[in-house]
Each structure stands twice: as structure tokens, then as C-alpha cells.
Image (cartoon, rainbow, N blue to C red):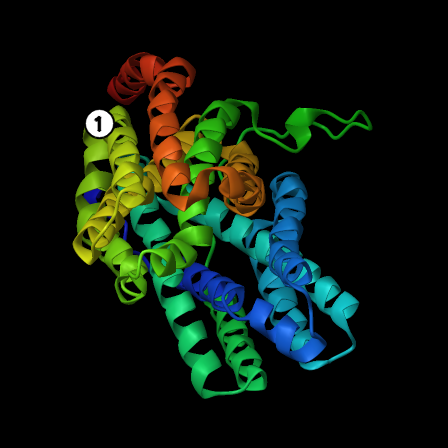
Amino acid sequence: MAELKDRLWTKNFVLISFINFLLTLVFYLLVVTIAMYAADTYHATASQAGLVTGTFIIGTLISRLFMGRLISQFGRKRTLWVGALLFTLTTLLYFFEFGIAFLLFTRFVHGLALGMASTASGTIIAQIIPASRKGEGIGYYSMSATLATACGPFIGLLMSQHTTFANIFLFCLVLGAISLTLSLFAHIPPLETEALTPQTKEIKLSDYLEPKALPIAFITLGIAFSYSSVLSFLNSYAAERNLTEAASFFFVIYAVSILLSRPFTGRLMDIKGPNVIMYPGFILLAIRMLLLGTASNALTLLLSGVLIGLGFGNMQSCTQAIAIKLTPPHRMGLATSTFYIFLDGGLGFGPSLLGLIVPFTGFSHLFIYLGVCSLFLIFLYNRLHGRKEREIRSQEQSTISI
């Protein structure tokens, strides 16, 4: 009976994880192709093409801000289904060439739909994973997004070289339709929860963000901000150092290192707590940035990719698990949206802010400076959460024994 209760790989777990993979795959596939589409079709400038890419993330952030509050009222499965439906229908808008303004609108609405669907899927996963396997389960779930970050850009660049943009959009439409269909087959059990607080007209921050998840969300923001420099500037940096061929394998190496380490790190977090993952993760984060900033050959560049997978890749799922564990069940939707708001904020706005610094530092020194700043995150994490972890685990053990 206990084994059944603690079972992780259920039909719902696999379905929701695969839906998340498909949605994230479309996002990353379009990230590497939509700027080229805007330039080729509408003769967009570099700044306009960048705005076309970034508008999607703005839409996602706005959606997450409201979805955390609305999920409990609208229903988790209904939110997922409506989000997947809007995500699929919005993809149709890419086929209409009505100018750059219409493309910006399409990207914004597409982002809103992704924020809705992915926040719902993250909330559902957090609630169906057994409490004793929370870290392991979230680790496996986040691997779906990790695979998408490697497959999406690869497929996108490959298709952009060998087919038309119309076929790229058609492929994204098919993936969206599959995710929509799968959402119909997911069975979401009723949520055991305490009575929800009656709705009032007074607007409070806690209606949109989960206060208990904010400390670890700030840490996530810092980690994502650092990682955004790799997403945005790796190709330019590699070209500068004649390492373009090695850079094409960078995110594949990154994904493989996560796939190999995640089964161990997720379980280790459940047994030993998140500190055993987070503190070494910060060290790896600093080392990989220093390696990247001083890379002079392919081996060094790819080694930094391994360390990114071991560091950022595992820390991302760890911080998500922390945010959820700190939150009561009826506010897991808010905790999930809070986590993703700060994660997307770091990934989305990091490139713009760091782009202002690059002319003064160059890519190499930028990576090195970010590596040094990563060490500061150790002290911030310790103050915001790390030193409280022993007390939290003691309370969990007391609850289990009772």
C-alpha cells in the first residue's frame, strides 16, 4: 500500500511531463527562428527582431502573475486544457502576414497561452507527486523542459536551413495540437485542501505571489540571470574565439549531463535536503563561468557545458521543489507561478541588461564577473533559506512520526 501511495511514474505524471516537453519545445524552436523570420519577411531591424523574441516572454510573465491566483478558482485541468487550446490556436496566427505589429501581438498572446498552460502543468505535477519523492519527481519533470532546451534550438536551426518558415509554423501547430489532445486524457484527482480564503475587493500582493516562495524565487532569479548570459552570447563568444563547431554541441552536452545526474540529485535532495545540492551547485556555477570566460579550446568550452548541467540544471529543479515544499497545498498554484515568474524574469530580462555591459567588458570578462557574482549567491541563499533548512527538516520528521 505504501509503495502504491509513493508511486511516481503514473500515467498522469508521464502525460503532464510530455505536455510540458511539447510546449517548451515549441518555445525554444521559435526562439531561434522567429528573429530570422521577422528579418526576412518584414525586414525588421536587429532591435525589432529582438523585441519580437522578447515579447513572448513578457506575455508569459504577465500570464503567470495572474494564473497562480486563478488556477484554484478555474480548476487545474480546465486551466491546462484552455491554455493548450489557446497555445494551439495562437500558432495559427503566424501564418498571417499582417506586418511587424501583428507579429508582436501574436508573440504576446502566444506567451500568455504558454504561461497559462505551463503554470497549470507545474501545479498539477507538484500536487500529484508523493510528498516523500517531491525532489525526485520535480527533478524528473523538469527534465522534460531540459530536453526541450536542447532539442528545440537544434530542430529550429535544422528546419530553418532546409525548409520554409510556413513548414516550421505547421510543425509547431502539430505539436500544439498533440499537447491539447493529451491534456484531455489526463485525470487530475480532486485536491485535498483547507477552505480557501474568501475573495475580497482589496488587492494584496499575496493574491498574485506566494510570500513563502519569494526568498527562494529571488535565488532562482540570480541563477537564471547568470545562465541567460550563456543562452544569449554563447554563439557570438564562440565565433569570436573560433569555437563555433564546439558551441553547436554545447547544449547537447548540457542536456546529457542533466539526464545522467538528475536521477541521483533528485533522490539525494529527498533524503539529505536541498542544501546538499545547492551549495555545491553555486561552486559549480562559479567554476563553469570562469572556465567559459577563459575558454581557448573546445574541451574547455564543452567542460563548462557539463558543469552548467550539473550546476544550473539541478539547482533549477531544486529551487522549484523548495518553493513547493514551503507552500500549503491550496497555494501551490501561486508558488508555481511565483517560481516561474522569477525564473522567466532572469532568463528574459538578463540578456537586455547584460547586453548593456558587454560593450564595456567583452564576453570573456562578462562571464568571469558573473562567475564571481555567483559566489555571492551562496551567502544570499544561506541567509534566505539554507540556514533554516535544518529546522524545516526537523519539523517534517516530527510530522511524519506523528
Instruction: Decide: few, some or many residues near mark 1? Use Cα within 10 Å; few <14, some 14-19, many ≥20.
Output: some
| Position of residue 287 measured from the top left corner of the image (x, y, whole percent) | 25, 35
| Position of residue 270 measured from the top left corner of the image (x, y, whole percent) | 24, 33
Residue at the image point whose x is 35% and y is 51% from the top? 141
Q: Compared with residue 294, is residue 402 higher up or lower down, i.e. above or below? A: above
Q: Amino acid at mark 1?
A: Val
Nearest to the observer: residue 40 or residue 339: 40
**Does any portion of residue 144 appear in the rendered image?**
yes
Quarter of the picture containing the C terminus is top left
Please identify the residue farthest to the right as the structure is shown: 201
Quarter of the picture containing the N terminus is top left
Residue at the image point whose x is 66% and y is 55% from the top? 55
Nearest to the observer: residue 394 or residue 87: 87
| Position of residue 213 measured from the top left corner of the image (x, y, whole percent) | 50, 27
Residue with the mark numbered 1: 276
Nearest to the observer: residue 225 or residue 48: 48
**Does any portion of residue 13 appear in the rendered image?**
no
Q: Compared with residue 177, is residue 163 higher up or lower down, i.e. above or below? A: below
Image quadrant assignment for residue 150 = bottom left
Image quadrant assignment for residue 219 = top left
| Position of residue 212 measured from the top left corner of the image (x, y, whole percent) | 51, 23
Residue at the image point whose x is 33% and y is 18% from the top? 386
Residue at the image point whose x is 39% and y is 19% from the top? 385
Relative side of 376 to 267, left or right: right
**Label 1 secondary element:** helix
